Image: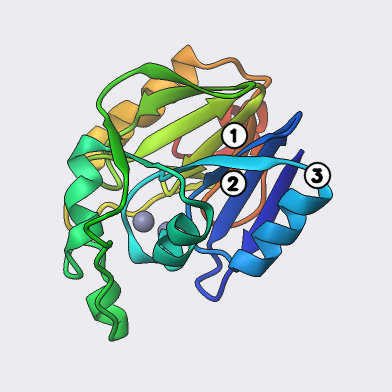
């Protein structure tokens, strides 16, 4: 089961639940709503998986990790974002997001598979939007953050952005991943990898 929460930045945070185990993809949703959905599904949150470190994806990260006491997974190259309001862009919005020093951070680098209870999560490093941008594949769901949107792609003009790296990441995504995957982007509506291969001018 997949729950989507849309915030004031039009950002999508997702709760992915399978047989009592859950992970949160990005962390910019209302804690009460997440709690309610976990309760209704009789599920336990096992981890927060961050597609990257921008503020619109981590707005409620502090509250979430304190409430649920779960580890935060992020790519090594985006870890700095969690401690730097300039890098995570919270400064632009008049905030100063800095993660508490007691947070449990787990970093990943390239391809990897993580297990959370009954959930298996495949990690695909996809630099371009940021250096540490990551896609998470769980079953037939692919969480693409700000790398791939329905009919569009992420911007590369922010700190750590690189249009050539993004083009290479998208080429890998297009060639290596099964087209039956459902796409759950960081902004906008869901799609299918098959449809994006056909309709997205950037793929
Ligand atoms: Zn972003
Ligand atoms: Zn975003």
Residue 157 in view: no
Distance Cα–Cα, label 3 vs label 2: 28 Å
Q: Return the residue found at the far bottom.
A: 94
| Residue at the spot 64% in from the left edge and 21% down from the top edge | 118
Q: Which image quadrant is residue 37 in?
A: bottom right
Report which residue position mark 1 lands on. Answer: 196
Give the label on residue 150, or none.
2
Report which residue position mark 3 lands on. Answer: 41
Cβ atoms at labels 1 and 2 below 8 Å apart:
yes
Distance Cα–Cα, label 3 vs label 1: 31 Å
Q: Is residue 58 left or right of residue 42?
A: left
Q: Is residue 92 above or below residue 150?
A: below
Depth check: give the residue in front, 30 or 157.
Answer: 30
Determine if the C-beta at disc 3 is less than 8 A from ligand 2. no
| Residue at the spot 67% in from the left edge and 23% down from the top edge | 140
Earlier in the chain: of badge 3 and badge 2, it is 3
Instruction: Point out the quarter of the image occupied by ligand 1.
Output: bottom left
Front disc: 3 or 2: 3
Crowding around mark 3 (Cα neighbors within 10 Å: few <14, some 14 to 19, many 20+) is some
Q: Return the residue found at the far right.
A: 40
Q: Secondary structure at mark 1?
A: helix
Residue 142 in view: yes
Distance Cα–Cα, label 1 vs label 2: 7 Å
| Residue at the spot 64% in from the left edge and 47% down from the top edge | 15
- Residue 57 location in percent, x, y? 43, 59
Q: Which image quadrant is residue 135 in?
A: top left
- Residue 16 location in percent, x, y? 65, 39
């Amino acid at each position: 089961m997949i729950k989507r929460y849309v915030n004031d930045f039009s950002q999508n945070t997702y709760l992915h639940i399978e047989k009592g185990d859950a992970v949160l993809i990005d962390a910019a949703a209302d804690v009460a709503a997440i709690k309610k959905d976990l309760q209704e599904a009789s599920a336990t949150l096992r981890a927060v998986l961050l597609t990257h470190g921008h503020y619109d994806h981590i707005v409620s990260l502090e509250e979430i990790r304190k409430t649920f006491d779960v580890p935060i997974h992020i790519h090594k190259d985006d870890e700095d974002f969690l401690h730097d309001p300039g890098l995570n862009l919270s400064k632009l919005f008049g905030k100063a997001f800095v993660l508490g020093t007691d947070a449990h951070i787990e970093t990943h680098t390239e391809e990897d598979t993580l297990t959370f209870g009954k959930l298996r999560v495949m990690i695909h490093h996809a630099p371009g939007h940021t250096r540490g941008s990551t896609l998470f594949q769980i079953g037939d769901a692919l969480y693409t953050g700000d790398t791939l949107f329905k009919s569009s792609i992420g911007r590369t003009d922010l700190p750590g952005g690189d249009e050539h790296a993004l083009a290479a990441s998208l080429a890998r995504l297009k060639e290596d991943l099964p087209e039956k995957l459902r796409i759950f982007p960081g902004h906008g509506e869901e799609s299918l990898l098959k449809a994006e291969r056909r309709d997205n001018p950037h793929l």
